[in-house]
Image (cartoon, helix red, strand yellow):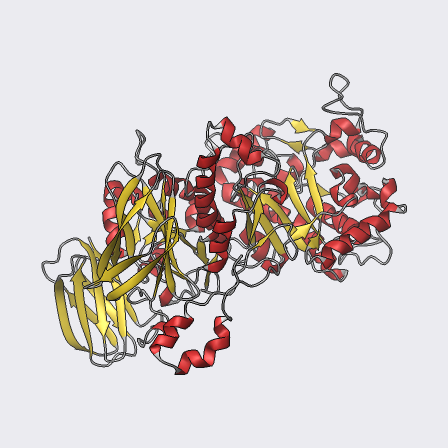
Amino acid sequence: MKFSKPNKHQWLCAFIIVSTITQLAAQDMITIAPANGLSADRPVFLFDKNGVFGQPWGAAGNAWPQQLFWNNVDDTNNHHLQEMINEASGIEADGRVPVLGCVAWGYEFKSATGGDSANLAATPDFSGLGGWKQWGEWMKDTSRVKYYSTNWKGKTEPGYITPLMPMKPDDWPTEWIAPKNWVAPSGWSDNKPSSEISYGQWLGTRLAQLALKTGNRGMMCADYVIGLEWGDAIDYNQRVVDDFAAWAGVTIPQGTVAERADYIQMNLKSKWFDFKCIRFAEFYCSMGQNLIDNGKIPLLGGQTLGETRGSGNDFRIYTHGINGSMSLPGKYWFFNVELQADDLRPPHEYWVSASRMGMLACREPDMRLGGQMNALGGQGMFDRSLEIDNRDTIWGKKHLTNQWLSVGWTHIAGRDGAVRRAPMSFMRSYWDAGETPEEEFDLILNHIPRHPFGPAVYYSVAIERSFEKGNGKYSNSWYMCTEKFTRELSPIKNATHQGYLRGLCNGYWVSDVGTDSLKPVDYPSAWIVYDSEYLPADEKAKLEAIAPIVDPEKKFSQAAKTLFPLGPVYIAQNEEQCLNGLAFVDQNESVIVMVSNSMESDATAKLMFNHVGNGTFECKGLYGCANTTLTISADSGSVPISVPSRGTIVYEIPHLKWLGHETVSSSTIKEKSKSDATIFPNPNNGLFTIELNDCDNATITIFNLAGTMVFQQKGFQSGKHLLQVRDIKKGVYILNVNETDKQIIRKFVVE
């Protein structure tokens, strides 16, 4: 990593008072902060010093039965206990959080009750081991059978009780004895539940006891523990279904397990998903809250493939709850997003990893996420995935460049309206054991996304929920926002609607909780909204007051023609090529443009710039390209580019400004508020209302995308004004409101 000149903030006074030349020089300074835990500005490696967490020796890595029945495990109660505590303390001293690694794989019940005599190598007999023995005996007791997970056909899974299950307090295992001086949850009696609560709360509280005993202060979960192992196919145990009906305030007709499952699937699916996610939130939050009650700061989470509400994972519910359900603030959470290839998973196509990260991070910005990335070396998972996919190492290194840079520069809008990097940490393949892509990681650290430079993909939970209604258990569709988006960035193939957005500069993701506080400098050039017919009217109006909505599925081949002229940059190329980009404004107010070639052949194209300030700008070649010059005249210009097969190039363009998106420090134009100028309706037919605030003798000018003026009128004051632009053609238009010291730019669509 390269450490350069003093921090920009040390020059603040000089920055304000000295000449423009000095001001511009100061913008080039970059200082990389040392690792200090999860951070969007300075992401860390998971297991490095001052990283995220570590798993100490001993109980933290024990099998699931032994973690629950830890009182019966010798090592947790003899001289080895102090060794566990010491190792946890060492992780704390290293600047990381010591956590339990909680995982199950489905073999546990058979191993705890004698193993598989026909295949003891795969399923050994652990029935004589402490913790295993007691867990097996408790699970196979006839009084526990009523709790077993049940699929939607009525089949039970012995030994698997899901967090959804309401548990009778009398079934609390006698072996589950709390540590000394333990502070119990409110309402408990004699250190055990005094009323019927979910198994999720049992598990979370029991694991909190183990963490306190062994010096840990959190857990990272996977597989059977992190969500319902078979997803929405379970848990239709009649006790769970009745509990769900009571929680939701609904009546579910009596019948067979399959009949009641069908009724839920066809009539109550979104509520059913909510219920499952609330119960899983109880699992995590019971542990977290009990650790807090006992004086510890928890870290809760695990690994996740994405938004899997059907399995019980909803980060918005985890951090904010529903109607008073258990939740904890985002500062107590961390999930690692699985983006890695391995023996069973080939490498993602370009932009897939970044889109998954962007979607998940923007859907709930308060949830802290990291990326489990591909990396050479280590345990060899990525290397073997390349071999299985018939790819060589050169191909693999090019893949790594695109994955790391695109994920590392994906940016989102938070609930507070601030734009930040999506991931806060990285994991180099499994166990963070792979090689660091040094050049790519340095670029990620050197350039922090601060503002967008183009359109945003918009994620609506209202649209998401519309796909949960009435699917039925055999047509379990979901909101395929990321799948549809990455399809449009793919090379054109013999597939339906594929590759129509080739040339887009993406990277910005915003959800329905990220728009209320969004500042004009962070408005996108357009909203990319899939399945927009399901967008609620009020949500649609809120978006249209900021930027036009484009649903690529409603336009397909016309989508690019609509999107590209709206934004400040896109890639012009021929139909045989597939170049896509990512762009943003960094912490020094430089524009960063990344372009990757998804195809196996070299490509030449042009970076096309629109709606940017006039002048001549140096384009610094940061990766895969040489320095060049960009000349902007009449707010537009272009740069020729050449990108090798599967290659990536990156430019830094200092001082280039997207008109209407200038920051206070980079422009004398006043930063406008969200309500300075509002157009409604948008889209319209040329007859519309514009509402102006804080305006005095303003001039309104409207241009088409070719730069031709189609309307101009002077003398506007604050208030609502009805405008009619006669003989206006369908398309996208730019509306400028100009005063002596203020300029406002709005886009609108004529249909």
Quarter where residue 165 is shown = top right
Q: Residue furthest left?
A: 727
Q: Position of residue 647 (x, y in %)?
A: 38, 42
- Tell me: residue 111, above or below residue 87: above
Observer-nearest of 176 and 618:
618
Q: Report whether 649 appears left or right of 689.
A: right
Observer-nearest of 559 and 588:
588
Q: Residue furthest top?
A: 118
Name the image quarter holding the N terminus.
Answer: bottom right
Q: Is residue 198 visible?
A: no
- Tell me: residue 613, above or below residue 280: below
Q: How many marks?
A: 0
Q: Report whether 506 appears left or right of 57.
A: left
Q: Position of residue 383 (x, y in %)?
A: 54, 33
Quarter where residue 185 is shown = bottom right
Q: Position of residue 657 (x, y in %)?
A: 31, 66
Q: Position of residue 391 (x, y in %)?
A: 46, 30
Observer-nearest of 444 and 330:
444
Quarter where residue 29 is shown = bottom left
Q: Residue furthest bottom?
A: 17
Q: Is residue 95 visible?
A: yes
